[in-house]
Image (tube, grey):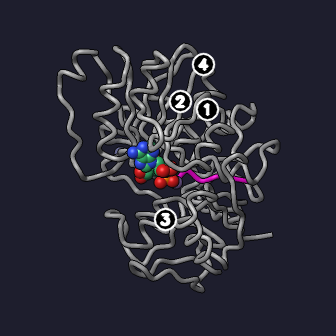
Amino acid sequence: MKSIVVRQPEELVIEERELPQPQAGEVRVKIRLAGICGSDSHIWHGHNPFAKYPRVIGHEFFGVIDAIGDGVTDRVLGQRVSVDPVISCGHCYPCRVGKPNVCTSLVVIGVHRDGGFSEYACVPASNAWPIPDGVSDRHAVMVEPFTIAANVTGQVSPIPEDIALVYGAGPMGLTTVQALKGVYGVSQVIVVDQIPERLAMAERCGADWAIDNRQHVLSAWLEEKQIRPTLIVDAACHPSILQEAVSLASPAARIVLMGFSSEPSSVAQQGITGKELAIYSSRLNAGKFPVVIDWLQKGLIDPDKLITHVMDYRQVHDAMTLFERDRQHCCKVLLTFAD
Ligand code: NAI
Ligand code: MN
Ligand code: ZN
């Protein structure tokens, strides 16, 4: 089989590998579609501190079960599945309190072990979530990015009367906007970014206002509209944003951070405690695959609004370069494997 491998930082190749056999408790998935994510680029360029090389990248993937390991009784050959990349131990403290996404021995498929940019991948059967017939392949491959939004919103239980402010109109900001509008019915969603084409995508995803914070001073714009956000999501992830979010937030607001910057943010306690703000963070997803599959079945979200390119996996080099360089026109880039 062919696999897309980062042999070492900056060396991305398509390799011939032996077809893997599923171990006990695993299934083998014949991949149909996979999505390119920023973290695949980070592994390619050596910027992911968790990655070990060589590595088959890809943690957003969908396909069909074509072999079943010993002891697996609840999956069948031919079943269409999307794969949750989070593998957890099930008994450490975070696992016991419902946060397997931060398991003390967390393994992420495509980061810590070989992933889905491959013709086949063996994964734990419990990570392979069956996809109902009514959900298309293109939607199924988008489950993982929407689980990030499900995790973010799950932290804060948005309500219709929330006024949400989302920083960043990349894939993460846009999935969050769709969840806020389509799932929770939040009445006012403001998105800020600095790329006009991305702001236009945010509007297509349901944002009520899309603001370019290079053209407008956000605090002045909010003040003029007399708006105080009650829920702020940082999907742009610059360390300076927390401080601004704290100052713009309504009393009793919630703020969710998604970034992994190692640079400190500078925030005064007074700004947080004075308004009794709640600051959350969100990493990967904690059992959100069934939640997002349900959203798709009910038509509450529309992944097609994020998919800008679909390319053959043999063009992975071009696809990833396009994804990195053309931020105006690229959002989600999918790779096709089988036909
Ligand atoms: P992206 O880079 O495509 O999108 C970020 C967007 O933020 C860009 O459109 C950019 O123009 C905008 N932006 C940057 N600085 C800004 C500022 N100061 N004000 C307004 N807009 C600004 O990235 P993507 O894929 O959407 O991911 C967003 C972030 O989320 C990344 O930092 C990524 O590392 C993080 N992430 C976190 C995950 C988690 O589970 N916590 C999962 C996936 C991504
Ligand atoms: Mn991803
Ligand atoms: Zn654990």
The amino acid at mark 2 is Ile
Tell which of 66 and 270 is nearer to you: 270
Determine whether 128 is above or below 40 in the image: above
3D distance between C-alphas at marks 3 and 4: 34 Å
Q: Which residue is mark 3?
A: 40
**Is the residue at mark 3 in contact range of ligand 2, meaning its CB lies under 8 Å from it?**
yes
**Is the residue at mark 2 in contact range of ligand 1, meaning its CB lies under 8 Å from it?**
no
Residue at image location 67% in from the left, 79% down from the top: 314
Q: Which mark is residue 207?
A: 1
Residue 156 horizontal/vertical position (percent): 44, 24
**Element assignment for label 1:** loop
State which mark lies toward you, 1 or 3: 1
Magenta-tinted stretch: 80-84
Label 2–label 1 contact, CB within 8 A: yes
Residue at image location 44% in from the left, 73% down from the top: 44
Residue at image location 53% in from the left, 30% down from the top: 190
Crowding near the residue tagged with mark 1, few <14, some 14–19, many ≥20 C-alpha atoms within 10 Å: many
Crowding near the residue tagged with mark 4, few <14, some 14–19, many ≥20 C-alpha atoms within 10 Å: some
The amino acid at mark 1 is Ala
Mark earlier in primary sequence (2, 1): 2
Residue 272 horizontal/vertical position (percent): 24, 23
Residue 95 horizontal/vertical position (percent): 37, 39
State which mark lies toward you, 2 or 4: 2
Residue 338 horizontal/vertical position (percent): 75, 70
Q: Which residue is mark 4?
A: 187
Mark earlier in primary sequence (2, 3): 3
**Is the residue at mark 4 in contact range of ligand 1, meaning its CB lies under 8 Å from it?**
no
The answer to whether one can see residue 246 in this image is: yes
The amino acid at mark 4 is Ser
Q: Quadrant of the C terminus?
A: bottom right
Mark earlier in primary sequence (1, 3): 3
Residue at image location 39% in from the left, 76% down from the top: 53
